[in-house]
Image (cartoon, helix red, strand yellow):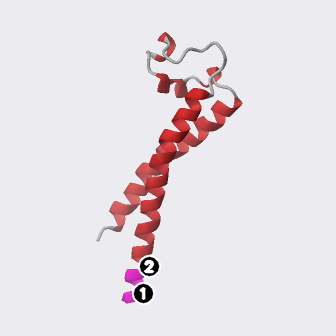
Amino acid sequence: MADQAMLLMGLRWMLLLCALGSWVGYFYFARRMVRGRQGGVAIFDRRFVYNPFNICFRPSLLTESGLRARRWFFACCAGLPLSILGLVSIGR
């Protein structure tokens, strides 16, 4: 019984750290994605509806480093809810 409780506690901490890492990574890679746009593309542009983070929906306007940041950005977007879902499913 004690071994199972310790295992669940370790799993909870691991999922909590994954959620925190995904949350921080979301902002970090979003910033890198916006900085990785091609030359001549304004941050606040009509093509993005004046929101710089909408560049993630236009991969043709990103450089290679911007595309790499975009892939990590979407991985963090998926990692956060999956980590929280794992925490909720473990329960108490």
Q: Amino acid at mark 2?
A: Leu
Give the total of numbered labels: 2
Magenta stretch: give its range.
Answer: 1-7
Image position of 67 with respect to 49: above or below = below
Determine the residue positioned at 51% across, 46% down.
25
Instruction: Work out which quarter of the rendered image holds the N terminus and state it.
Output: bottom left
Assess whether residue 78 is covered by the magenta stretch: no
Q: Amino acid at mark 1?
A: Asp
Assess whether residue 5 is covered by the magenta stretch: yes
Locate residue 12, reporting x and y percent: 40, 68
Contact (Cβ within 8 Å) of mark 2 with mark 1: yes
Image position of 9 with respect to 33: above or below = below
Q: Is 17 positioned to the left or the right of 38 in the image? A: left
Given residues 8 and 65, the one toward you in this image is 65
Determine the residue positioned at 40% across, 61% down.
86
Labelled disc at residue 3? 1
Secondary structure, magenta segment, majority class = helix
Q: Residues within 10 Å of mark 2 (few under 14, many from 20)?
A: few
Locate residue 4, reporting x and y percent: 40, 83
Q: Kindly identify which residue carries mark 2.
A: 7
Instruction: Work out which quarter of the rendered image holds the C terminus and state it.
Output: bottom left
Which structural element holds mark 2?
A: helix
**Furthest residue in direction right, as rendered:** 64
Given residues 30 and 71, the one toward you in this image is 30
Determine the residue positioned at 46% across, 60% down.
17
Locate residue 13, reporting x and y percent: 43, 68
CA gap between label 2 and label 1 equals: 6 Å
Which structural element holds mark 1?
A: helix
Q: Is 11 positioned to the left or the right of 41 in the image? A: left
Q: Residues within 10 Å of mark 1 (few under 14, many from 20)?
A: few
Locate residue 79, reporting x and y percent: 48, 50
